[in-house]
Image (cartoon, rainbow, N blue to C red):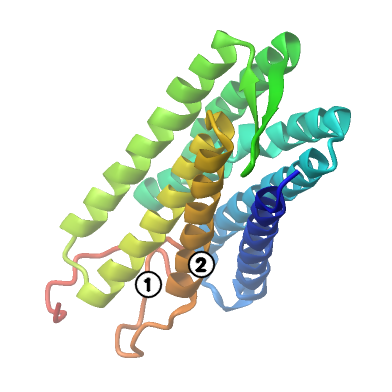
Amino acid sequence: MSFGLLLNAIVCFAIVLATLAFAVNLHQHKKSQKEESIPTVNALIAFWSLVGVFFLFAGLETLAAYGNFTGIEQNLYYAGSLPFAFVTVPLVYFIIYIILGDTRISLGVSTVFLIFGGIYLVALFGFGIIGPTTTEWGSTFAINSNIAINVYLSGLFIVPTSMIMGLLLLILLRRIPKKLQNKIAFSLVAISLIFDFMLLNDVAPSGALQMAARIFIVIGAVIGFFVYFTPLSSDMGMVDRLGLSQTRLPDFEHEDE
């Protein structure tokens, strides 16, 4: 097979390094967070870890395609479907907690998406997959189940994406310092890039489109890492429920924007 498959695998492993480095740094910074911020930090650690594990399997799957090990490639696709199905759970918990600040409600809502993920996996494993279709730049599979596709699109993609966009709009409408507002907004944009292109990666009809999706995911991971760990000016004294330091998002009536 071509060098394009090797390059595709390298991009996957770059995503693994970026996301797992993000998760490790979040864990190391937990001690410096206020208690109210810990739930969102834990949710972000879970989210970035699941993304990293998914692309670890995706990278190994691409290497298997390069070596023409079709059986191994199929098994790795199934293995990668596990973190793929549940990446929505910490994401939804994260969003609900930022908005409401209630761990019980956040846990309840995210449990609904845990059930959706389980239904997706049952349909996926029950009806199987079609492929692989290997091209110069990647190797793709088709899901042999309309149930699995509809569950993911409706329950595990459209709703969380709408929640991210709604939270982003809410943040932009709040009266908070401009620098903090930008930091939060770019963090959400990075998460949205990762989440949206993960779907495109999984349903890509061609290897070239799959490769393009993975490149955008690398960009999203890098943006998220640097935005999150870029320090705010010391005179702000706080950050929001994103776990950047503190949880509340008060209206800064007397702050300069």
Q: Considering the numbered disc 1 on the image, is that residue within a helix, a strand or a loop? A: loop
C-beta proximity under 8 Å, tags 1 and 2: no
For the image, the number of numbered tags is: 2
Residue corresponding to mark 2 = 222
| Depicted 97 relative to depicted 244: above or below | above
- State the image coordinates of residue 203 (x, y, percent, origin top left): 54, 29
| Depicted 204 relative to depicted 164: above or below | above
- Mark 2 is surrounded, within 10 Å at the Cα level, by few (under 14), some (14 to 19) or many (20 or more) other residues, namely some
Q: Which residue corresponds to the image point at 58% horizontal and 33% vertical from the top-left?
A: 202
> At label 2, which amino acid type do we have?
Val
> At label 1, which amino acid type do we have?
Val
Question: Can residue 103 be seen?
Answer: no
Q: Nearer the viewer, residue 192 or 178?
A: 192
Residue corresponding to mark 1 = 239
- State the image coordinates of residue 220 (x, y, percent, origin top left): 47, 59
Q: Nearer the viewer, residue 239 or 8?
A: 8
- Which of the 4 image quarters holds residue 49? bottom right
